[in-house]
Structure formats: C-alpha cells, structure tokens
Image (cartoon, rainbow, N blue to C red):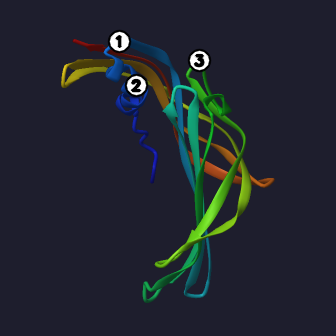
Amino acid sequence: MRRIALVCSTVALLLATAAAPAMAAQPFKESGTQNYLSSFSSDCSGTGNRTTCNESFLDVFPVAPDVSVVCFSMSTFAFNERTGRGRLISDENGCSETASSALAVSVAGDTLTATLSDTSVTLFSCNRRTCTEAGTVSVSASESGGPITPYSNRGSFKEGKCTFRFSFTGQRAEVAGTVTVDGTALAHQGGASTEDYRVSEQCR
C-alpha cells in the first residue's frame, strides 16, 4: 500500500522556524502540535482484457507552526491484462497552503480520527513539455482507525556556532474513511498521526 508510512518532519520545521533567530544570535524556543494525514484510493474495472483504474491521493503535512500544505492528485490509466501494455489517460495534481487547524487529529480510546475541513486545491495537468491549470476542487476528509502506536524521538545537531535541539512525542494509526472531492465521496485508506514537538536553538 502506497503512502501509508508518514514521515515526521520536525527537523525541517525546526530549520524553518529557527532561521531568523539564528542570525540574531538570540535563544530560540518553539513548541506545539502538528498533524499528518496521507491516504489513497484505487478503483479498477475491466471489460475483456482491458482494465481501467482511477486513483487518488491525499497528503496533508505541516510546513510551519501555523501552516499546512494539502496535496491532492487523481489519475486514470488503462492497461491490457494479456500484454501488460498500458497508457495514462489523465493525471491532475496540485497543492495549496492552509491553516494548520484545517486538519484535526483526535484520539479516543484506541481510535485515532483525522478530519480535514473543506480546502480548495488548484490542480494542474502536466506533460513532458508544460503544465496547464485544470481547475480548482474542494477537498475534505474524514478517516479513522486503530490500533494506535505511540512514538517519540529526540536529538541535536550543531551548525556553526549554533546548537539545535528537538524532541517529539506522537501517536499514529492506519485509518480508513472518505475523501470528498467536489461533493463526490471516495473510499480512502492510509495513515494519520498527531505529535507534540519542542525545538530550540542556542548560539554562542
């Protein structure tokens, strides 16, 4: 299954938030909660030797303490079961920034639930030469599942005269539910997580 594993980007968040304080050589501390959701759908049907598949992917991840990126893609392709030859019929994808609060991840008992509020994403259709705008869609999601797996990590590194430290503790689970695109509900499955993080920087 594609995109079930979620990569926690706390170090990337640290670099983004700590860049300005580093130049001023002032102590820096940041803490908060960040949420992730990554899921996909695949629906195939066939007539004779020809099989046609529709796939869609949703990824939501933080890029700053108050900003998340929502990426959505959908494609259609067909292939011949006998020869294995196939062709891509259509492929559209795009990403939009939104408030981090657009993705809520909650834990109740042994169930983790991820809910994405309506978010507008502008899609593009690309070939080998260029990309053209393919329209804007409204994307939302509601997915849940378990069991929940806790995780944590901490570390530090130096860059010049500055020492960076980070730590995070979170919970993740495989989830399933629906992603709604312009009013059409698609059955999705994947993974989601929520984590509390702390980052700091001290320069001599």
Q: Is residue 129 left or right of residue 92?
A: left
Please name the amino acid that badge 3 sits on. Gly
Secondary structure beneath dot 1 equals loop
User: Can residue 105 be seen in the rendering of this structure?
Assistant: yes
Q: Residue at x 38, y 23 (%)?
A: 18
User: Can residue 56 be seen in the rendering of this structure?
Assistant: no
Above/below status of 103 relative to 121: above
Secondary structure beneath dot 3 equals loop
Q: Is residue 123 left or right of residue 84?
A: right
Please name the amino acid that badge 2 sits on. Ala
Question: What residue sits right under mark 1 in the picture?
Answer: 26
Question: What residue sits right under mark 2 in the picture?
Answer: 20
The crowding category of the residue bearing disc 3, from other C-alpha atoms within 10 Å (few below 14, some 14 to 19, many at least 20), is few
Location of residue 142 in the rendering, given as x and y in whole percent from the top left corner: 68, 39
Quarter of the view holding residue 93: bottom right
Question: What residue sits right under mark 3 in the picture?
Answer: 109
Q: Residue at x 37, y 27 (%)?
A: 19
> Which residue in the rendered view is the most extreme toward the right?
183
- Report how far apart the C-alphas of labels 3 and 2 lie in the structure: 40 Å
Above/below status of 83 relative to 101: below
- Report how far apart the C-alphas of labels 2 and 1 lie in the structure: 9 Å
Tags 3 and 2 touching, CB below 8 Å: no
Please name the amino acid that badge 1 sits on. Gln
Q: Which of the two labelled residues, at mark 2 and mark 1, occupies the earlier sequence position?
A: 2
